[in-house]
Amino acid sequence: MPIIHLLIVFSWFIAALPAAPQTLIAQEQIEDAFLLKTGGFVYGDLTAATSTIRAQTLAIVTQTGIFHITQDGPNLVLRSNVDLVLDPTDNGRAGAVIVPATMMEFPDFLGDKIRFFSHAYKIGISPFDLDITSDRNIKFHSDTVPDLMVILGDEGDVKIRRDLEAGGDVTAGGVFQFAEDEPGDKLLLYDTLYRLAISPDTFDFYSDYFFAWHSDTSINAMVLDAETGRLTLTGPLQLPVYGFLPDGHVGELIYFDHPADDNQDGAYIYKSTGWHKL
């Protein structure tokens, strides 16, 4: 058969074969594509204009580390062996923020969770503790009132703008001090029936009925009836002892111990006419 006939038959055979499947990429979908398949990986640049790039795993490999976007069971995972930086500001040229649409959760391990400014301002977890760290002070504000509560980092003092309500004991390691030197109620022990107060030149004790003094071994060693002013002692009354008769006020009691005359020794009461031996 002449060679020309063989070429005609071969051309007819090639044309009769089914066409190989092709992927059509419109220009408005992919602006630039450069792909190189090596083993199980595809390398190159791919820029999508209007369509979506779909893949099981997106891996970015650099000289310093890896970055994978993949699926692990029911979770979508961003995985890398270098720090991940979320920067919506375009290197400081824009003013965008990061807005989580739902709850943020951290793995169950101890240590720092959020660092705001180096290691000096952070929130972390230590055994049984939530740690809030500041370079100095920790402040709490509302949207309208600043410094509602301030913890002073250098001393550990706590300043509160208004009242402090405690559902249990209040323990002080040092002096319990009132900041303002003003008269008025200082401690309300049980409503206003039992309280401690300051009035001009006077330290005031209030009770609904009795004042009672106790020790670890004696109950009601001294009881003062607040209604009548009657004072009851479980032991003897020890009078102050003087070696001379001082100036006095009506109703005062002393014990006079004369330095030379024992006959004048004894208890004395001050009347309107002076000291009188009982």
Image (tube, helix red, strand yellow):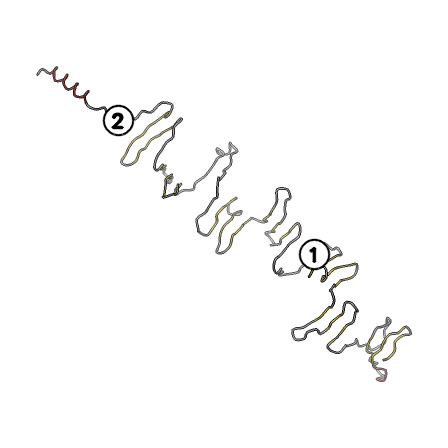
- The residue under the point 72% across, 59% down is 192
| Tag 1 and tag 2, C-beta contact below 8 Å | no
Q: Quadrant of the C terminus?
A: bottom right
Q: Amino acid at mark 2?
A: Pro
Height in image: 272 above or below 206?
below
**In the image: residue 95, left or right of residue 216:** left
The relative height of residue 220 versus residue 46 in the rendered view (above or below) is below
Q: Residues within 10 Å of mark 2 (few under 14, many from 20)?
A: few
Of the numbered discs 1 and 2, the one sitting upstream in the chain is: 2
Q: Secondary structure at mark 2?
A: loop
Q: Quadrant of residue 141?
A: top right
The structure residue drawn at horizontal position 86% and vertical position 82%, both measured from the top left corner, is: 264
Q: Position of residue 150 (x, y in %)?
A: 62, 49
Quarter of the figure with residue 188: bottom right
CA separation in Å, label 1 and label 2: 88 Å
- Residue 37 shown left or right of residue 276 in the figure: left
Residue 21 is labelled as: 2
Task: State the residue in front, 188 or 127.
Answer: 188
**Badge 1: residue crowd in 10 Å (few <14, some 14–19, many ≥20):** few
- Label 1, secondary structure: give it: loop
State left or right for residue 193 relative to residue 71.
right
Residue at image x 72%, y 61%? Answer: 193
The residue sitting at the left extreme is: 1
x%, y% of residue 197? 74, 60
Amino acid type, residue under disc 1 in the picture? Phe
Horizontal and vertical percent position of residue 253: 82, 75
Return the mark for residue 178: 1
Q: Quadrant of the N terminus?
A: top left
Q: Nearer the viewer, mark 1 or mark 2?
A: 2
Tell me if 163 is positioned left or right of 22 in this view: right
* Label disc, if present, on residue 134 of the rendered structure: none
* Relative image position of residue 122 (x, y in whole percent): 52, 47
